[in-house]
Amino acid sequence: MSTQDYPIKPAHRTQQGCSHDRFLQRYCVVPSDQFDPVAILKRADESRGNQRGITWTIDLTHWKNEEMQKRGNSRDLKVKARAYDFLAIYNSPPKQKGDKILRSNGNMWFCTRSASKPVPISQRQKILGNAAYGDIASTNYAEDYKVTVVKEGGFEGEACWVFYLESRPGRKTTHDRLKYWVSKKRRVGLRAEYFAVSGKIFKSANMKYELRTERGGERKPFISEIRIFENLVSKNTTVLTFSSPSLQDLIEHFVSIGASFTY
């Protein structure tokens, strides 16, 4: 690819850039002012549900050693999202039908019909298998993470920008650090690798975009599947299957505790 398509400054190392990150490899490629990584991440966030108002259904299935677990193997939820806030309502399993998960201004709560009040939860807590609560809704990588390095790479034959991301101070993120492959052509995230404090990859995820949303005559790709792999201990896999995305104008107060947890 020519520098006209991807203008960059000469590669270099800085003390606060890549030398302190054990997972970085040979080069730090520093984009020029003509290249806007935040805009690229924002576009990728939109295909992961970060829009003015959208609903979708998500089915979670966990596979253990390449076989579906016989008990507690799936969840099905209906999600309403407005930008980075969301309300998710369980459709199944039957014992959890009607239970709710709310994220508002970076905080999360869980509520059941039998509970007297919502319970605060962390979006890093597991909802099923390898999937955390924060994995079921929209991403906000453009605002929640700082880009430390950008490289060129590829995934499954598709040319990508590869972003090294670190959680911004004070942000309640699902992961501290990740490596994120974004398609140059489609502007969607294709793969992510998530790093533990030790610098080792503890899980990874591959994404597909076989769904579409449309607003103002413009059709955009929308996430259809996230396949999350456990890397440190086993080969267990959790699959998130998205369906029925629908753009809607959602009022802001639907993600308030009072409105969301009224049965």
Image (cartoon, rainbow, N blue to C red):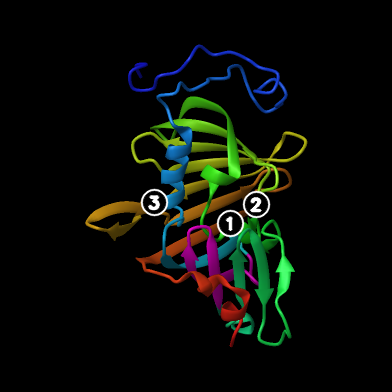
* Residue 202: % across, % down: 69, 43
Task: Say whether marks 1 and 2 touch (CB < 8 Å).
Answer: yes
Q: Kindly identify the residue that appears in the image at 51 percent across and 46 percent down.
A: 206
Element type at mark 3 = loop
For label 3, the crowd category at 10 Å Cα-Cα, with few meaning under 14, some 14 to 19 and many 20 or more, is: some
Spatial CA distance of label 1 from label 3 is 16 Å
Spatial CA distance of label 1 from label 2 is 7 Å
Earlier along the polypeptide chain: callout 1 or callout 3? Answer: 1
Can you name the residue that lies furthest to the left here?
Answer: 217
Q: Is residue 26 above or below residue 221?
A: above
Q: Which mark is residue 152?
A: none
Give the magenta-colored segment's residue range. Answer: 69-90
Q: Which mark is residue 209?
A: 3
Q: Which is closer to the viewer, label 1 or label 2?
A: 2
For label 1, the crowd category at 10 Å Cα-Cα, with few meaning under 14, some 14 to 19 and many 20 or more, is: some
Q: Kindly identify the residue that appears in the image at 64 percent across and 54 percent down.
A: 65
Q: Kindly identify the residue that appears in the image at 61 percent across and 48 percent down.
A: 229
SS assignment for the magenta stretch, majority = strand
Q: Which is closer to the viewer, label 2 or label 3?
A: 2
Answer yes or no: is residue 175 visible.
Answer: yes
- Badge 2 amino acid: Thr
Per the image, the residue denoted by label 2 is 174
Q: Which mark is residue 135?
A: 1
Can you name the residue that lies furthest to the right here?
Answer: 198
Answer yes or no: is residue 205 visible.
Answer: no
- Badge 1 amino acid: Asp
Query: In the rendered image, which quarter contains the C terminus?
Result: bottom right
Earlier along the polypeptide chain: callout 1 or callout 2? Answer: 1
Task: Decide if residue 93 is on the left or right side of residue 45.
Answer: right
For label 2, the crowd category at 10 Å Cα-Cα, with few meaning under 14, some 14 to 19 and many 20 or more, is: some
